[in-house]
Amino acid sequence: MKLLSFLVLAIVNIWMVAAIPNKENDNGYFQYWITGNCSGQADIVGLGKKYENAKEIEIPAYFELQGCKYYVRNINYGALANNKFEKVTFNYNPKNVNLVHSSFYNNKYLKTVVFNTSKVTIDSNAFNGCSDIFFDGTGVPTLVTQMSKDLLKQWGLPVGYSGYDEASTAARNKKSTDLYKLAKKINESLNVQAANAGNNVLSILIFRSASTRGYHMLFRELALTMGVSEKYILTVSDAHCAFWTYVKFDHDKWYDEWLNVDIYYYDFKKYTGTSYPSDFYMKNAAYSKYLNDHANVYLFKDHPVHKRPDQWYVYIARYGTTYENLHEQKVLIDDYIRQKNLGGDRP
């Protein structure tokens, strides 16, 4: 009887192993590999015939086979490479989806990727051979935070430091020094990108190219990830021809001040010290002259707005996505500081 029970159990186990569909499948839209039983996973390995000439494709949360759901966990190496689609949408997925190295390699026509899920991990080389992709969707903030932390660690800069905005000399010096180091790293690492994705922070992190505005949007995002409060660093503009960053420094309970920072045109090669140069943080009068003499010498020299800090604006968009109304959301600096009760002198 014991022998019979053992044989039956062995046969059942063999049948169960054989029933697990560890194989490549094709639902017409995707080719995918599934592993495990009904609690297993699916890895996308290629496009199916129905998506061969599609301009838009959607990545599903799962594939259903024989009544079981296999949640997408990976877009495999080269799985969606060398195709002609222009837009990819990732639907909500309760499981994390990993875009591995070269998963979207050489998609020359790809211009938009929408993440409707925050559970995504992107290999830094997932979009090799692509360019100027606009990343959108509610999952973008989480991805930006993840990649910002990785980049700061790579550059040897703090993540989540809590003492930057204290009203002390030591705090101001550390903040000034670390922000200068960050600005220099960004300036050394980015190329100019004037196209649509140049203001899109996730695109900038992936492709390392940005517009002048994008330089300062990334600067602010990385500064926030370092630990600077969002109340103490703003992306601003003359709403005419230049973008830069406005940084607040606290001195004591009676006095604090806002200073202007440029990381796009500033000549970082002239300073070889280990802290920060004395002319990097500029008061309004000095920055007005800087705008006229340096930042726009070849474009709009002597424009009146350079001398009118009361006509400079805060630009609200943080990530450069469509739902933030990228270009429309701006407020005069004085009004913004007053509305948000941020305080501080604007010398």
Image: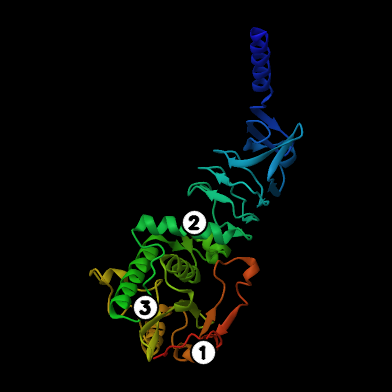
Residue 146's mark? Answer: 2
Instruction: Please identify the quarter of the rendering in which residue 45 is found.
Output: top right
Horizontal side of residue 253 vs 242, given as left or right: left
Badge 2 vs badge 3, beta-carbon distance below 8 Å: no
At 50% across and 80% down in the image, what residue appears? Answer: 237
Badge 1 vs badge 2, beta-carbon distance below 8 Å: no
At 65% across and 17% down in the image, what residue appears? Answer: 14
Nearer the observer, 128 or 339: 339
Instruction: Please identify the quarter of the rendering in which residue 166 is found.
Output: bottom left
Nearer the observer, 33 or 238: 33
* Spot occupied by residue 53 in the image (x, y as percentages of width and height): 71, 43
Front tag of 2 and 3: 3
Q: Secondary structure at mark 3?
A: loop
Q: Quadrant of the C terminus?
A: bottom left
Answer with mark 2 or mark 3, whichever residue precedes in sequence. Answer: 2
Q: Secondary structure at mark 2?
A: helix
* Spot occupied by residue 150 in the image (x, y as percentages of width and height): 43, 55
Residue 334's mark? Answer: 1
Above or below 258: residue 99:
above
Above or below 185: residue 74:
above
* Spot occupied by residue 210 in the image (x, y as percentages of width and height): 49, 64
Distance, label 1 to label 2, CA atoms, is 33 Å
Residue 166's mark? Answer: 3
Type of amino acid at the residue the image marks with label 3 = Glu
Type of amino acid at the residue the image marks with label 2 = Gln
Answer with mark 1 or mark 2, whichever residue precedes in sequence. Answer: 2
Q: Secondary structure at mark 1?
A: helix
